[in-house]
Image (spheres, rainbow, N blue to C red):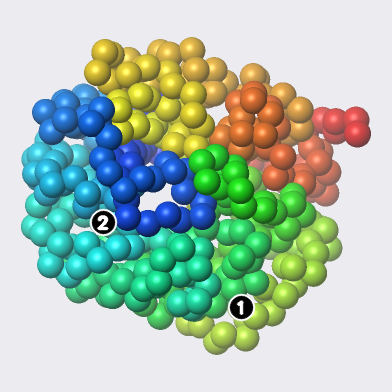
Amino acid sequence: MRHIRAPRHGSSERPFIVIWEATRACPLACRHCRAEAVPDRDPGELTTAEARGLMDQVAAFGSPPPLFVITGGDPFQRPDLYELVRYGAGAGLPVAVSPSGTPTLTAGNLARLKDAGAKAVSLSLDGSTREVHDDFRATRGVYDWTLDAWRAARETGLKVQVNTTVTGHNITDLPEVVRVVSELGATTWSAFLLVPTGRGRLLPGLDARQVEDVLNFVYDAGAFVPSRTTEAHHFRRVAVQRGVLERRGADHVEALGLGPLYERLRERLSGLGLPRRRARRPPMDVNAARGFVFVSHRGAVHPSGFLPVAAGDVRRDPLPDIYRSSPLFTGLRDPDRLTGRCGACEFRTVCGGSRSRAFATSGDPHAEDPWCAYEPGSFPYQDDLAELGIPAGTRVPG
């Protein structure tokens, strides 16, 4: 399907990406933190030898290996970070690091990561100004540290992914965030729709109609910066819908029932005069347990970092066995297990909804995603979907 990219190998056999929470230690106290990070390291973290063993397990998935991302907390709080990056690169893994915006994020440290074999870093930008970003990160100076590191990483030759947590604090600032991404340059800009876990439980969320407006804005932003989403798997549904509507010459605002928030975001984006990209990059078909696996600082294996249900422990069982065979993972890869609107939706194999958000709000990882407003079967061009291999949906009684 040209609107969606699929991993080169079946997602039931190997993940596209493995994220390892190397530590929960971090000097910041960000308002949305999934890890509820703390200043000091946990003595129960994977040791250096155990972390090497984890990377060997990731390499055992076969070639080409999954992308291996070292996150936290702040990975720079581990004194063995460079040693571990070097070991992972030597094992043939494409290694990326997701550091926090702290004073440790220096040009020298980024150069050491590159020399050790890291391919990329991901940085967080939650506002286009110091005031918006630093307030969200609850620390003054984070905005400047982040932008300085962004420039330094690019000069060093590291690829840069920029992540933006979308909440009420910055929802109208998103066009300006896209402007900053366009000006500084990034491999990818990812809009993260908050999952109410950790400290994020205290933040006000969006409603489903606002999410539709935001996802369609992210689609528009893809004409100017390489855009994707995190925990907003219905962006893939939006990409398919927008592609069909463009081919039909139909008005997407009317066809999708988009609201005033979308109109405001679109108007501000179009008024920035940003240079357009040559081609749009379709979103990747990855979801919790389906191309994605998360390993905690203590070695517990989760379908996602935002779905706090463990399927095993890398200290006891090989990661490939857990990923391929655990009931939690195999169940989440089965679209017939989905319930509610997600289970009835024609886009269930394309999207699947956020299993993390479903669990956080209902306690059931197979429940419908409450931040999706789409009514199954309501897209006006069902025949076009059938041509793309998407079966008809079933309307769910209200």
Place of residue 306 in the rendered image (x, y in percent of width and height, measured from the top left): 50, 37
Residue that label 2 marks = 120
The first of marks 1 and 2 along the sequence is 2
Looking at the figure, which quarter contains the C terminus? Answer: top right
Relative to 354, is 386 on the left or the right? right
Q: Reply above or below: 374 against 253.
A: above
Amino acid bearing label 1: Leu
The answer to whether residue 316 of the structure is visible from this angle is yes
Q: Is residue 87 left or right of residue 62?
A: left
- Residue at 72% across / 24% down in the picture? 339
Location of residue 7 in the rendering, given as x and y in whole percent from the top left corner? 40, 38
Q: Identify residue for label 1.
A: 269
Q: Position of residue 271 (x, y in %)?
A: 62, 86
Q: Quadrant of residue 38?
A: top left
Residue occupying image coordinates x 56% and y 35% = 356
Badge 2 local density, few (<14 within 10 Å), some, or many (20+)?
many
Compute the Cα span from label 1 to label 2. Answer: 28 Å
The label number, if any, that marks residue 154 in the structure image: none
Element on which disc 1 rests? helix
Where disc 2 sits, the SS reads: strand
Badge 1: residue crowd in 10 Å (few <14, some 14–19, many ≥20):
many
Taking depth in this image into account, of 182 and 316 the one nearest to the observer is: 316
Q: Quadrant of residue 13?
A: top left
Name the residue type under label 2.
Ala
Query: Image point 67% across, 53% down: which residue?
Result: 204
**Nearest the eye: 278 or 296:** 296
Pinpoint residue 226: horizontal percent, then vertical percent. Answer: 45, 64
Q: Residue at x 76, y 32 (%)?
A: 341
Q: Is residue 31 left or right of residue 95?
A: right
Q: Is residue 231 visible?
A: no
